[in-house]
Image (cartoon, rainbow, N blue to C red):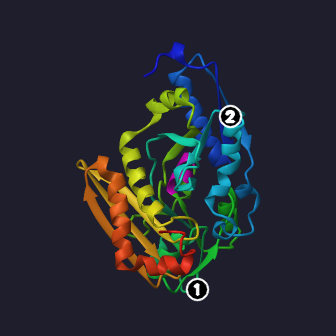
Amino acid sequence: MPNSFLSPQKIVIASRESLLAMWQAKFIQKCLGELYPQTEISILGMTTLGDQILDQSLSKIGGKGLFIKELEQALEDGRADIAVHSMKDMPMNVPEGFKLAAITEREDPRDAFVSNQYANLDVLPEGSIVGTSSLRRESQLRAQFPHLQVHPLRGNVQTRLRKLDEGQYAAIILAAAGLKRLGLSGRITALLNPEQSLPAVGQGALGIECRADRTDLIELMQPLNHQATAFCVEAERALSRVLGGSCQVPLGAFAEIINGTLELRGFVAQPDGKRIISGALNGKPETGIAMGQQLAKKLVGEGADEILAALVPADGWK
């Protein structure tokens, strides 16, 4: 751990202003405060374009990068030193001039089924409306439960729960990590295992971003980097990067380390779930990035290229 006398006088954290984003920023603020008690650590709250446009799906308005750009601008012009992101919101290619300084230990990576009337997906009556903002979730739901209706659901966690409580949906699917972090574990009706709903790339992990030239900050963030989580998330991101992963592509990737072996699963699907190309690889944790690239190429060889070609521009994923 770096000596406290080498720490800066002040660190400013850029964050979105949603309750979940602020929880994440305050969590990192607390961790840094314990590491560097002589440093003043503050939070710069910001409203991003992704937070402002709520009447359209992310896949139609530019993807999850809309949650990131304003925060990176604050890093670039010096208003903030670091930004805290949900790793599942991070574009697969970090822009030139920026760097992921640390990836924190993962919270529960699974998706959560939330309903006020039904115990799980299996008992939902035909025609029931399920809300989700994710093409990844939608494709898996449609493949397994073609008798259900899947409708878009945008907004922060509280907004989504309110729409459920108002009866707009029979059930909604959210990330378990966000509910747990907000103290809303009691709203989780059932947890979906990866066989039911393969998680999003990076789901449950937080990323700390800074300017690439801030080697001082990169060093200071190292105690918060959880190596096992980083190996897993880097493998997932490598797979997604090869496949042009974005909100426009129904894609999932999930890695976990079991008995010292990194086990990586991934899929690409048509939005309607009628065709899903999936696969898995096992290997050493430190080879995760190569594994992700290898599994992506395997999926392409089995037909993922045809799905991708219909979803994104021809040069968008190669």
Q: At 49% across and 55% down in the image, what residue appears?
A: 203
Q: Could you tell which of marks 2 and 1 lies nearer the N-terminus?
A: 2
Question: Looking at this rendering, what residue extends furthest in the top direction?
Answer: 5
Foreground of the two, 172 or 226:
226
Residue 236, numbered label: none
Secondary element at image label 2: loop
Q: Quadrant of residue 41?
A: top right
Q: Position of residue 285 (x, y in %)?
A: 30, 48
Residue in the picture at 41% in, 61% down: 239
Q: CA distance from mark 2 to mark 1?
A: 48 Å
Q: Position of residue 316 (x, y in %)?
A: 54, 69
The percent coordinates of residue 145 (x first, y second) are 48, 82
Tell me if residue 80 comes above or below residue 238 in the rendering.
above
In the image, residue 180 lies in the stretch drawn in magenta: yes
Residue 193 seen in the current view? yes
Disc 1 crowd, CA 10 A, few/some/many (<14, 14-19, 20+): few
Q: Nearer the viewer, mark 2 or mark 1?
A: 2
How crowded is the residue under tag 2: few (<14 C-alpha within 10 Å), some, or many (20+)?
Answer: many
Q: Which residue in the structure is indicated by mark 2?
A: 80
Question: Is residue 113 shown above or below 271?
Answer: above
Magenta stretch bounds = 176-183
The residue drawn where x is 69% and y is 73% is 168
Identify which residue, 279 or 124, lies in the foreground. 279
Element under disc 1: loop
Q: Look at label 2 and name its amino acid.
A: Ala
**Mark 1 = which residue?**
127
